[in-house]
Structures are given as C-alpha cells and as structure tokens.
Image (cartoon, rainbow, N blue to C red):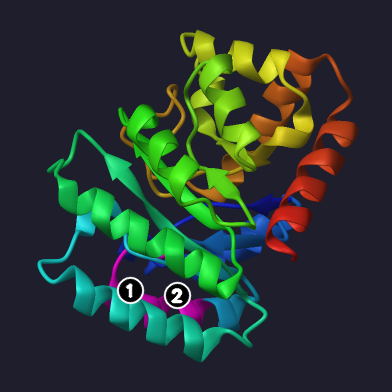
Amino acid sequence: MIDTHAHLDMPEFDNDRDELVSEMSKHGISSAIIPGVAVEQWQKQLALAEKYQWYFALGIHPWYVPDDIDSAIFLLDRKLQECRENKRLVAVGECGLDKLHHWSDKQLLLLEKQLQLAQTYQLPVILHSVKAHQELLTLLARVRPSRGGVVHGFYGNRQIAERYIALGFKLGVGGLLLNPSAKKLRQTVVELPLEHFLLETDSPSMSPFDQPNTRNTPLVLNRIVSEISFLKKSETVCILEQLNKNALQLFEL
C-alpha cells in the first residue's frame, strides 16, 4: 500500500518516526507521499523522503498564505527547478482553497500561481478544498494542469466528483469513509469506478471517527481498504491492486 497523502514530516512524528515506519512495513505499507505545506518545511520533507525512501510534493497550503505571494512563488519555482531531477518529487502541493480558514482572494491568487507551476514542470497537483468546490472547479476549468492531480480528503457527492474527474482529477479517500454518517462520500465510492480513487490518511489529522482526539497514522489504511471492499462488494486484494495502480499511474512512481 501507498499512503498518497501523509504529513509524516510534522512534529507529531518526531519522537517515534522510526518505530512507525517499522510498523508500516509490517502492515504492508511500502511508501508514502509527503505533501508540502510551507516554505519552512520543504527541506525536512526532502531529508525524510531520502531517509525512508518516501515521495514528496512541494507547495504552499492555503492555511499558510504568505504576505508576499510573489516571493513565495519565486522560492517554490526555484525549489522545483532544483528538485526536478529528483525522482522522489511527484507533485505540486498541497495547495488549494479553504473557506473556513482566513478566506480571501489571496488564496485564489496563490493557488493559480501554483497551478501554473504544475503546468510548467509537468507535475500533477495535490488539491485541498474545504467549502470551496465551486471556486476551485471554476479556476481549474481556466488553469488546468495537463497532468491532472488529486482532490485530497474528498467528501462531496457524485455530481461534484464527476466534475473533478472530467477535469482529469482523482479523489483522495481517507478515514472519513469509515464513518457511517458520511453518507454522501460512501455513496460516491459505491457508484463511481474504483479507477477514480486514491488511498490516503492525511496523517496526523483526520483520525477515524471512532478514534477521536488521537494521532492519525498510515496504519489506518488497512481499515480503509477493507471498508472500500465492503462498499464495492469486491475482494480486498482486487481493491488494493486497483488503488495501487491508480497511485502509480498518476504520480508515475
């Protein structure tokens, strides 16, 4: 298994990262993609990707919109250029829009410039969207990276899902799927072909509903795969094979 969205560079893992990696291996989790969130975190991502043979993306999260967007984009462009021969660089992001966190036009500007960089470097994008699907879809229709990408932590209905898919994006599914109350998401997973989904956890955030206030880790992936298997009425091995294939194809791992 590959966790396609895990913030394993966060300080929550600093005290036991080696032990967690060992447990991941025992549970069949072979790798992870570490999304970027801020300029200050990029170097740590690179070091951990090298140490543990993980993959990484470089980007600026909408929670960390800088005062000087042009300067931050200049640094991102320079870092992407520096890493363009690094086979562990697989995407631009995590970038996107979040209406619940200091929403402003600066988020739109920051995202648009990152989408343009994704196009320049021919990389997929890892997108964050909270209460902003319409704005995000409108921007993607105008500035669409040719490699597509993934809308991580997807929680919308089938109609929204199909609009992203039509633009060349996959849908990241994580621990929210384990919540019986997440009816829209669960129905979307039932109705759409498995080729449109990616497996993720968003660790250390988005802990499963039955483990509130605990640190989330990639170890929950087995539960998510089992739930997808149950919803799709298909063998777990078939589900896992397709999900891995999706990740390998999108990120060219």
Q: Is residue 91 something one can see in this rendering? A: yes
User: From mark 2 to mark 1, how far is it between C-alphas?
Assistant: 6 Å
Residue 41 circle label: 1
| Amino acid bearing label 2 | Gln
Disc 2 secondary structure class: helix
For the magenta stretch, what is the residue range? 36-48
Dot 1 falls on a residue whose secondary structure is helix
Q: Main secondary structure of the magenta part?
A: helix
Q: Is residue 8 visible?
A: no
Work out whether residue 113 or residue 178 is closer to the camera in this orientation and state it: 113
The crowd level at tag 1 (other Cα within 10 Å; few <14, some 14-19, many 20+) is some
Is 46 included in the stretch rendered in magenta?
A: yes
Please provide percent x and percent y for residue 208.
Answer: 46, 29
At a point 52% along the width and 16% down the height, the residue shown is 157
Above or below — where is 231 with respect to 114? above
Looking at the rendered structure, which numbered label has been put on residue 183? none
What residue would you read off at disc 2? 45
Magenta residue check for 148: no
The spot of residue 63 in percent (x, y) is 22, 52
Q: Quadrant of residue 167?
A: top right
Position of 189 relative to 33 (above/below): above
CB under 8 Å between discs 2 and 1 = yes
> Seen in the image, is 197 located left or right of residue 114?
right
Tell me the residue at 61%/60% (across/down). 32
Identify the residue shown where x is 67% and y is 62%. Answer: 31
Mark 2: few/some/many CA within 10 Å (<14, 14-19, 20+): many
